[in-house]
Every structure is written in C-alpha cells, then in structure tokens.
Image: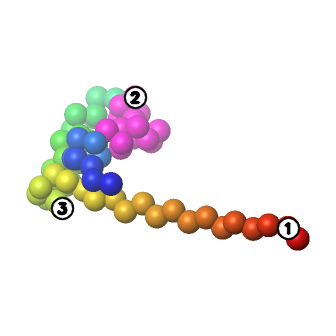
Amino acid sequence: MTRTVDEVIGWVFSLSYSSPAQLGENKDAFEQDLREALLAFAPSGRFDEVIRTEAVIATRP
C-alpha cells in the first residue's frame, strides 16, 4: 500500500496520543515538524507499506 505524506499525517492525527485534541495549540508546529521529517526521509512524499497477513487453519479429528 502506498500512502502520501498527507495520508501519513492524517493517520498520525488519528492516534489517541497525537490527536489534535491532545496536541492543542502545538498541533500546527507538530504537523510542520512531522511533514519536514517525512519529506527528509522520502522526498517524493510517497511511503510504501508492506502488509503481511498470515492465517493458521486447524481442524479437529
């Protein structure tokens, strides 16, 4: 799954410890710092997430 920088920031804001309500007046500064850090890591603004799923299926005799 590929996410944009805005989608990653939206996801971070959806977490309880980094929600806009928790950040209060620091929200805008946090978002700016986060955006800068993300773009320094991936200047394209695209982030690939590999999602692995595994299932163990068992039956009883």
* The magenta stretch spans residue 43: no
Quadrant of the image containing the C terminus:
bottom right
State the residue lying farthest toward the front: 61
- Looking at the rendering, which quadrant does residue 59 occupy? bottom right
In this picture, residue 57 sits left or right of residue 54: right
Foreground disc of the pair 1, 2:
1
Mark 1 surroundings: few (<14), some (14-19) or many (≥20) residues within 10 A = few
Please name the amino acid that badge 3 sits on. Phe
Which residue, given by chain and number where applicable, does mark 1 sit on? 60
Residue at 22% x, 34% y: name it. 28
CA gap, disc 1 to disc 3? 49 Å
State the residue lying farthest toward the right: 61
**Dominant secondary structure of the magenta stretch?**
helix
Which residue, given by chain and number where applicable, does mark 2 sit on? 21
Residue 41 vertical placement versus 29 (above, below):
below
Labels 1 and 3: the sequence-earlier one: 3
Quadrant of the image containing the N terminus:
bottom left
Residue at 12% x, 55% y: name it. 44
Q: Are marks 1 and 2 in contact (CB under 8 Å)?
A: no
Q: What x and y, as percent, mark residue 29?
A: 21, 38
Foreground disc of the pair 2, 3:
3
In this picture, residue 49 sits left or right of residue 15: left
- Looking at the rendering, which quadrant does residue 57 occupy? bottom right
Which residue, given by chain and number where applicable, does mark 3 sit on? 41
Task: Tell me the element at label 2.
Answer: helix
Residue 20 vertical placement versus 44 (above, below):
above
Labels 2 and 3: the sequence-earlier one: 2
How many numbered marks, from 0 up? Answer: 3
CA gap, disc 1 to disc 2? 49 Å
Labels 1 and 2: the sequence-earlier one: 2
Span colored in magenta: 10-23
Residue 41 versus residue 45: which sits nearer the camera?
45
